[in-house]
Image (cartoon, grey):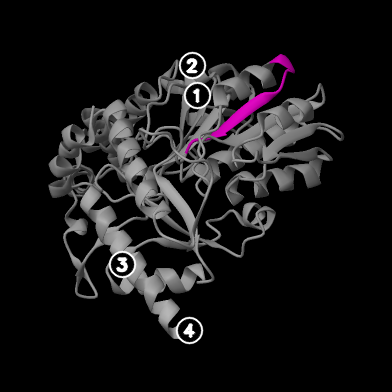
């Protein structure tokens, strides 16, 4: 399928995103920051609004009509998520506020209760802070040892080093599926196969993959997988943890309170069955229902089609960026069709500070991200103070890339003129 054929994806959906049709500083908005958060289609926003205007009620607790309708929609969204990632059971989907909370749930419920001094946790140098800091807490509390996989020459996950690091002492491997800075797609299926041979569990941070490509947790065979709704066209404040049912059953609750109990006595309690054991208190009901709507929206477009379209946009983005002198792009290059990496490019433009670059691009209506992207250790490993990042989604167009490239060239020329 060619870009000319798949261009209709963006043409078809842009009307669904009213936020994209505005001017910033008198220029048409070019939104290239979807890796930080995606925009939300009207279908999702209307679903969220409909909950609050038509059947706002607490779930699981009432026999009246509104409560029953809210419960059906809330639990129905769980079914949609389970099908979207091919979970074996709806009980394997736990609602969380975001991926960070989902990782912390595993850290405190499983790791704190299963790891001991000398046990090993393998991470990588490219991890988001959310997949580093919780394991630092665990290591400090349990005496477990942290190990980190470094990068290959093309700035990808070093699988050969991983094979050398893993041992019978390794109890957990927690790695990102797609780096939010390097854009590399890590071989998570192979990582799981190797880890399981050593009896280790595997957690996958899928925040940058679930919104952009088909995900099959049974094929990957990971033990846990986390994602955030706000990166997949849903509202903020909602995400999910996938976990194999037998593992979740063996884990104690993370939070205590209402909803997660079966019976409560003054001196002890018994706990609810999955998935409610991990969902204490009144949940983000409207947000969960809207996440289900986002899954519907993405599924209707087709994840294969989204992935193919974004790959071709990626190839074009790299072609144009690489044509500019003094641009350095980090992470592996895409292949000729744009596959092999994510639809984002972290880069530096000569000696221009990324924050200055981003600020001047904003004057041209172009929204990109600058800084360390919550990957300080990675930037330190690469000896970089920061990078600029342009990230794409299926609602972006080739014409927007052209506008970005023109604005980038103009900005670089401006800095060249004042720096002499």
Q: Which residue is mark 1?
A: 274
Q: Earlier in the sequence, mark 3 or mark 1?
A: 1
Q: Earlier in the sequence, mark 4 or mark 2?
A: 2
Report the residue that reaches farthest toward the right. Answer: 118
* Left or right: 162, with 351 as reference point: right
* Left or right: 204, with 408 as reference point: right
Q: Are marks 1 and 2 in contact (CB under 8 Å)?
A: no
Q: Which residue is mark 4?
A: 420
Q: Which residue is mark 3?
A: 407
The label shown at residue 244 is none
Q: Earlier in the sequence, mark 1 or mark 2?
A: 2
Q: Secondary structure at mark 2?
A: helix
Label 4 and label 2: CA atoms lie apart by: 56 Å
Q: On the rendered image, what quadrant is the N terminus found in?
A: top left
- Give neighbour class at mark 3: few <14, some 14-19, many 20+ (Cα, 10 Å): some
Q: Secondary structure at mark 3?
A: helix
Q: Is residue 202 within the magenta segment? A: yes
Label 1 and label 4: CA atoms lie apart by: 65 Å
Of the two numbered discs 3 and 2 in the rendering, the one whose residue sits closer to the viewer: 3
Label 4 and label 3: CA atoms lie apart by: 20 Å
Residue extent of the magenta highlight: 197-206
């Amino acid at each position: 399928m060619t870009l000319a054929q798949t261009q209709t994806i963006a043409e078809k959906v842009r009307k669904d995103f009213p936020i994209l049709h505005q001017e910033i500083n008198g220029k048409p908005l070019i939104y290239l920051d979807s890796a930080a958060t995606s925009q939300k289609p009207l279908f999702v926003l209307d679903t969220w609004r409909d909950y609050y205007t038509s059947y706002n009620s607490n779930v699981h607790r009432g026999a009246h009509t509104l409560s029953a309708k809210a419960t059906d929609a809330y639990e129905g969204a769980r079914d949609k998520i389970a099908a979207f990632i091919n979970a074996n059971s709806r009980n394997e989907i736990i609602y969380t506020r975001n991926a960070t909370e989902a990782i912390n749930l595993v850290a405190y419920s499983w790791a704190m209760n299963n790891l001991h001094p000398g046990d090993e946790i393998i991470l990588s140098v490219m991890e988001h802070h959310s997949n580093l800091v919780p394991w630092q807490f665990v290591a400090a509390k349990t005496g477990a040892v942290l190990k980190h996989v470094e990068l290959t020459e093309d700035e990808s996950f070093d699988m050969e080093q991983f094979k050398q690091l893993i041992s019978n002492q390794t109890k957990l491997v927690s790695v990102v599926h797609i780096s939010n800075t390097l854009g590399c797609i890590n071989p998570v299926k192979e990582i799981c196969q190797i880890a399981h041979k050593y009896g280790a569990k595997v957690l996958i941070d899928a925040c940058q993959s679930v919104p952009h490509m088909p995900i099959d947790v049974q094929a990957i065979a990971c033990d846990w997988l986390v994602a955030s709704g706000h990166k997949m066209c849903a509202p903020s404040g909602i995400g999910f943890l996938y976990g194999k049912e037998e593992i979740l059953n063996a884990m104690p609750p993370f939070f205590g309170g209402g909803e997660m109990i079966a019976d409560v006595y003054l001196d002890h309690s018994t706990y609810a069955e999955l998935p409610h054991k991990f969902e204490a208190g009144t949940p983000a009901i409207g947000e969960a229902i809207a996440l289900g709507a986002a899954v519907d929206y993405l599924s209707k477009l087709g994840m294969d089609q989204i992935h193919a379209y974004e790959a071709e946009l990626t190839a074009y983005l790299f072609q144009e960026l690489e044509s500019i002198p003094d641009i350095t792009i980090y992470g592996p290059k895409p292949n000729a069709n744009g596959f092999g990496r994510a639809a984002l490019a972290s880069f530096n433009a000569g000696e221009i500070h990324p924050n200055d670059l981003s600020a001047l691009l904003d004057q041209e209506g172009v929204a990109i991200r600058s800084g360390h992207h919550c990957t300080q250790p990675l930037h330190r490993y690469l000896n970089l103070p920061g990078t600029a990042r342009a990230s794409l989604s299926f609602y972006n167009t080739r014409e927007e890339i052209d506008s970005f490239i023109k604005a980038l060239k103009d900005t670089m020329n401006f800095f060249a003129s004042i720096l002499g």
